[in-house]
Amino acid sequence: MSIFWFITTLLLLHSCTPGVGVVHGIVDGKVSSPHSRPYMVYIRDPQTPSEACGGFLVREDFVLTAAHCKKDHLMVYLGVDDTNDLPEGIEVDAFPHESFANKPGYDIMLLKLKTPVTLSETVKTIALPGARAKSSSNCMVMGWGWEKYGHASPSRVLREVNSTLLDSENCAIPHTICTEGTAGPSQGDDGGPLICGNVAQGIMSYFIQVESTTYLSIYTQIFHYLPWIREIMETTL
């Protein structure tokens, strides 16, 4: 369930090279104000609690996340501030994209809550895009990921950082959007949203190291998958 699922041999070798700087989860970001991102969802399998993902609420009964976050017994936790004090989890049925094959591409999954939530000040949905995000858009990524790259130290509280979209031609594969820099997501931030103008434009999929302290973060482009999302949400009982 890690965003390292697609790190190449080159990245692994580079990470072990002497002199490479330590990278912190949500690098150069900040702690989110408690409950200021009420659409954020904490996702994990209680049988493997150290392998968590992020997600976001798009309807009272559906959470959107990454397909590679799928586990056998996933639970979702809404209205989370501190992961050391989780509310009661909700069981889900998982619907990963049928073309996902545990490699880059089609990395999108809907989780249907077995008990729909009641919206409140601390639990809200976020809008899906009506158009593709433009390059150079100012966006934000967030999650409870590791605070230090390569060290099992997930953040107890939600963290966020601003990011700027690159031209789509700089992304690794079709139907993705990307950001690049020394700031960005880390392990455990998988499945979380890339928010641009209060709209969820991307789903955190994976990243690759392009320089000693610079990373290219790749997100599933939600706009491309809107027909699939609508089909699942409208036909799933």
Image: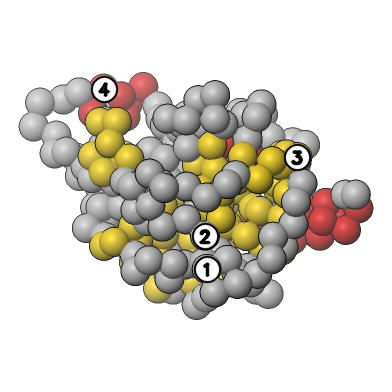
Residue highlighted by disc 4: 13
Residue 199 picture location, percent across and down: 56, 72
SS class, disc 2: loop
Query: Could you tell which of marks 4 and 2 lies nearer the N-terminus?
Result: 4
Residue 179 picture location, percent across and down: 39, 57
Query: Could you tell which of marks 1 and 3 lies nearer the N-terminus?
Result: 3
Q: Residue at x 36, y 22 (%)?
A: 9
Query: Could you tell which of marks 3 and 4 lies nearer the N-terminus?
Result: 4
Q: Nearer the viewer, residue 170 or 158?
A: 158
Alpha carbon distance from label 4 to label 2: 39 Å
Residue highlighted by disc 2: 79
Q: Nearer the viewer, mark 1 or mark 3?
A: 1
Q: Nearer the viewer, residue 52 or 223?
A: 52
Q: Amino acid at mark 3?
A: Asp
Alpha carbon distance from label 1 to label 3: 23 Å
Q: Amino acid at mark 1?
A: Thr
Q: Residue at x 41, y 47 (%)?
A: 85
